Amino acid sequence: MKPYYQDDWATIYHGDCREILPTLDKVDLVLTDPPYGVGYVTAWRSHGDPQRVPVANDKDLSILSAVWPLCMALLKEDRHWYAFASPRMMGPAGAILEGFKHVLAWDKGDRGTVGDLECGFGEAWEAIFYGMKGRRPLNGPRPRTVIRRDWSATMDPVHPTVKPITLLAQLVEWSSSPAETVLDPFMGSGTTLRAAKDLNRKSIGIEIEEKYCEIAANRLQQEVFDFTGAVG
């Protein structure tokens, strides 16, 4: 399949990852933010907000169930993987992401707090499943399972569930080496690919919605940021 976008470091494919993944070569890291299976349309955005839109294939976790074996088939031996998940769907997600080693907690700080404002706790974290195919040491000092990155999607308002580049860069640096290849089969607006490029890793992203492919391509053409020393 012809890439939607390609440069020396990143390749984007527009289409269904279930069709594209079997055509790809092996990769060194799978890092992805798949649909959470929660029928996401956030309630806190105003009705006129262009990001108040459903996420594709988010009615349940069937897409993750279909795609994950394809990802694991592409992952080389002795390599890591990460997959984001909703705290409310950790049981079903964990059953699909079998063999995970840890569930990391991304603490989004006060800006990421959602939920019942009167009778509930502020839900300000998301889960990140982490696992290995074989065994490979993490880079740098032993990290904690709680990662603090203050965040709200309004800080990068191009996709309803966008993740911060600095968080993704941290995961990329812990679990890969320069010139290795990172795969994100649910690419969204390309933050994983941007993080990989900034850290001199190659990357492959797949996205089913063309508007996000365009945003990701533009993101990749921006000036490279310096994430030297992100481990810690």
Image: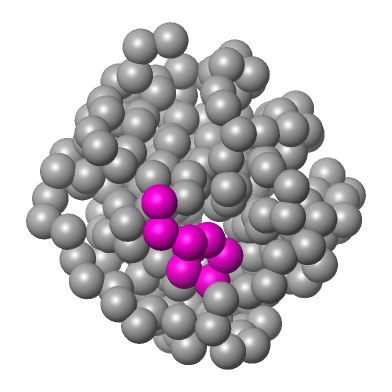
Taking depth in this image into account, of 140 and 112 the one nearest to the observer is 140
* Res 146 quadrant in image: bottom right
- Relative to residue 53, is residue 62 drawn left or right? right
Look at the image and name its color scheme.
one colour
| Residue at image coords 39%, 45% | 202
Q: Quadrant of residue 57?
A: top right
User: In the displayed structure, would residue 96 be above or below residue 21?
Assistant: below
Q: Residue at x 47, y 50 (%)?
A: 180
Relative image position of residue 136 (x, y in whole percent): 71, 65
Magenta stretch holds residue 215: no
Query: Which residue does the image show at 26% across and 26% down from the upper left?
Result: 5
Q: Nearer the viewer, residue 139 or 157?
A: 139
Asked if residue 29 lies left or right of residue 134, the reply is left
Could you tell me if residue 115 is visible in this image? no
Residue 178 lies within the magenta run:
yes
Above or below, 101 relative to 179: below
Task: Judge from the rendering whether residue 66 lies leftward or rightward of residue 190; answer left or right.
Answer: right
Q: What span is colored magenta in the figure?
A: 172-179
Q: Is residue 118 above or below residue 168?
A: below
Residue situated in front as seen by the camera: 169 or 178? 178
- Numbered marks: total: 0
Residue 138 image point, x, y percent: 63, 74
In percent of width and height, residue 137 lies at 68, 72
Image quadrant occupied by the N terminus: top left
Could you say where residue 24 lies in the image, as x and y percent from the top left? 55, 23
Observer-nearest of 150 and 147: 147
Residue lying at the far left in this picture: please name it.
223
Residue 50, relative to residue 89: is it above or below?
above
Using the rendered image of the protein, determine whether residue 29 is visible from the camera's viewpoint: yes
Q: Which residue is at 47% across, 69% downward?
A: 173
